[in-house]
Image (cartoon, rainbow, N blue to C red):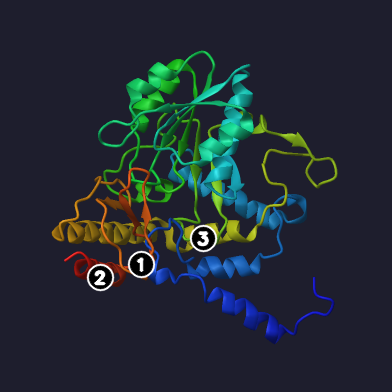
């Protein structure tokens, strides 16, 4: 640590020089996060010092967290859903599995997850000492429900389905999986970290939410397609009893018990998430999602025109292709199977797509 501090001018000159080393969002095609909406930024700045870990000190901010949970619960056909704001999908998934383990009370618990599940489930199983049973995918890159049912036994505490997979943008057969979970009495968690802010705003989208009686919990990340500031995730649960199974005593805080994983929790990004939903409403979100899907299909059509076929036909705005040469400065990613992966987030507007396709055409001519 410096003995004498820097001047503000020197400090920010240094900090901004490092910021310039970051990749410009105009060339980021691999991220499921995006430039936050201006109302999220404004809300974030207004609530910078709030701490939801001690809600009695910030009752107004805590009420906004409850309103965010209510808004999302209603969106997912359960206005009375319980839940709280997390740091994102990883925390939500850890908490869902922790909850399922607590409720099941098995000595040697296992969880059944699809091969396409996010790597956060590996972390969750390591932390919680759960056996992870991986279900193969069908040819359409969705979880095989029959194979899932066969893997469930008396020690299974949770089954997981994905609504909008990270790599291919697919939604598992949640309706079928919900029935299996209900019939076998297994806790069923839906990881909708990405698809949860896309599918509700698409006509004819696969059903994944609490309208299905077997769905126990849902994870969604407003800092992805919800365009909130980072970090902003939400874990939603069908009933308070399940959530309270995670409670621990917090004797020196303004509340005497809490069920969250993190202690200190920022209120700023939570309010930012709510601000976007309130500002845009369902109509505005439908417009945003429609634009992203239009750009996704334009990207798919353009790539196939250049002889680069899609690897899958996605449910959400994730496009995957056969390997291709990618010119700088574009930043893309690759799936475990080696497919090119691109995500058409709100910052990937029509002009960005056309510019990328032009460069791809020249590179792969």
Say whether residue 27 is left or right of residue 359: right
Element type at marker 3? loop
- Asked if residue 106 is positioned above or below residue 79 in the image, the reply reads above
Residue 125 in picture, x, y percent from top left: 57, 32
On screen, residue 199 versus residue 313, left or right, reads right
**Mark 3 neighbour class, 10 Å CA radius: few under 14, some 14 to 19, many 20 or more:** many
- How many angstroms separate mark 3 from mark 1 (CA)? 24 Å
On the image, which quarter does residue 44 sit in? Answer: bottom right
Q: Can residue 80 be seen in this view?
A: no
**Pointer 3 or 1: first along the chain:** 3
Whether the residues at callouts 1 and 2 have beta carbons within 8 Å, the answer is: yes
The correct choice, above or below, for 158 with respect to 15 in the image is above
Q: Which mark is residue 330?
A: 1
Query: Any mark on residue 228, and which?
Result: 3
Q: Residue at x 25, y 59 (%)?
A: 294
**CA–CA distance in space, label 3 to label 2:** 31 Å
């Amino acid at each position: 640590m410096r003995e004498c501090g820097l001047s503000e001018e020197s400090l920010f000159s240094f900090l901004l020089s490092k910021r310039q080393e970051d990749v410009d969002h105009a060339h980021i095609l691999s991220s499921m996060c995006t430039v936050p909406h201006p109302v999220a930024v404004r809300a974030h700045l207004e609530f910078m010092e709030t701490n939801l870990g001690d809600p009695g000190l910030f009752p107004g901010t805590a009420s906004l967290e409850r309103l965010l949970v209510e808004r999302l619960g209603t969106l997912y056909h359960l206005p009375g859903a319980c839940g709280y704001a997390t740091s994102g999908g990883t925390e939500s998934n850890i908490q869902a599995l922790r909850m399922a383990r607590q409720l099941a009370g098995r000595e040697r618990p296992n969880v059944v997850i699809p091969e396409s599940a996010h790597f956060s489930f590996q972390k969750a199983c390591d932390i919680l000492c759960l056996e992870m049973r991986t279900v193969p995918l069908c040819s359409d890159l969705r979880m095989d429900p029959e194979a899932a049912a066969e893997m469930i036994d008396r020690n299974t505490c949770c089954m997981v389905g994905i609504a909008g997979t990270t790599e291919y943008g697919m939604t598992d057969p949640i309706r079928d999986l919900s029935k299996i979970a209900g019939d076998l009495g297994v806790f069923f968690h839906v990881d909708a970290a990405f698809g949860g802010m896309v599918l509700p705003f698409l006509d004819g989208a696969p059903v994944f939410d609490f309208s299905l009686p077997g769905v126990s919990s849902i994870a969604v990340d407003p800092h992805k397609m919800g365009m909130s500031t980072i970090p902003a995730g939400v874990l939603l649960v069908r009933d308070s009893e399940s959530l309270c199974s995670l409670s621990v005593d917090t004797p020196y805080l303004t509340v005497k018990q809490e069920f969250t994983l993190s202690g200190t929790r920022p209120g700023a990004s939570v309010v930012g998430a709510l601000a976007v939903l309130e500002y845009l409403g369902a109509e505005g979100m439908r417009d945003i999602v429609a634009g992203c899907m239009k750009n996704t299909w334009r990207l798919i059509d353009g790539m196939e025109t250049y002889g680069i076929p899609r690897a899958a036909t996605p449910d959400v705005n994730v496009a995957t292709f056969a390997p291709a040469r990618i010119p700088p400065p574009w930043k893309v990613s690759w799936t475990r199977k080696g497919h090119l992966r691109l995500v058409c987030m709100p910052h990937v507007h029509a002009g960005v797509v056309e510019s990328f396709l032009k460069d791809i055409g020249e590179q792969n001519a």
